[in-house]
Amino acid sequence: MAKNKKLPKFVTIGPFKVELICAPHELIYDLGEAQGLFVQKPPYKIYLDKEMIEEGGADAFNLVVHECMHVAFYQYNMKDKDEEHIVNSFGNFLAELFCKSELKDWLRENMRD
């Protein structure tokens, strides 16, 4: 079921402005053997399976949040960190993603399957 809200062209979280790029499924799968891919070097980009995003709903929501969580892992330098650092970082990141970012309206709409 396609949703009305369009996916924004970028999301800004903390110091990172990340371009959101929808591309054909075959290209995305060839790049990362998945439906999405976060590029961890400037200019930051997230590639997303266009067909999945156009379909909308829970699967599209999951894909976008999953790739954004890679941004959080990178942004908060979570490799080898302790539990409190990780939990605090993800909490801060998710609050910003769901409450302040350009993605908030799209995410809310796609929560309703």
Image (cartoon, rainbow, N blue to C red):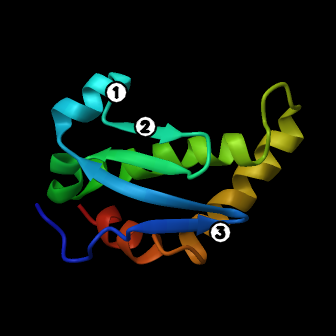
Q: Which mark is residue 96?
A: 3
In the rendered view, does 5 fall on the left or right side of 69? left
**In this picture, is 45 found above or below 97?**
above
Residue under the image location 27 percent in, 52 percent down: 22
Bin the neighbour count of mark 3 within 10 Å (Cα to Cα): few under 14, some 14-19, many 20 and up: some
Q: Secondary structure at mark 3?
A: helix
In the picture, the disc for residue 37 is 2
Q: Are marks 1 and 3 in contact (CB under 8 Å)?
A: no
Image quadrant where residue 110 sits: bottom left
Task: Please name the amino acid that badge 1 sits on.
Answer: Leu
In this view, 65 is above or below 29:
below
- The single residue placed furthest to the front in the displayed view is 43
> Counting residues from the N terminus, which is met first, the one under dot 2 or under dot 3?
2
Mark 1 vs mark 2: in front: 1
Few, some or many C-alpha atoms within 10 Å of disc 1 (few <14, some 14-19, many ≥20)?
few
Residues under numbered marks 1 and 2 in contact, where contact means CB atoms less than 8 Å apart: yes
Instruction: Identify which amino acid the numbered label 3 is placed on.
Output: Glu
Q: Residue at x 15, y 55 (%)?
A: 55
CA–CA distance in space, label 2 to label 3: 21 Å
Q: CA distance from mark 1 to mark 2?
A: 8 Å
N-terminal of the pair, mark 1 or mark 3, is 1
Give the camera-side residue of 68 and 91. 68
**Circle 1 is placed at which residue position?**
31
Q: Quadrant of residue 29?
A: top left
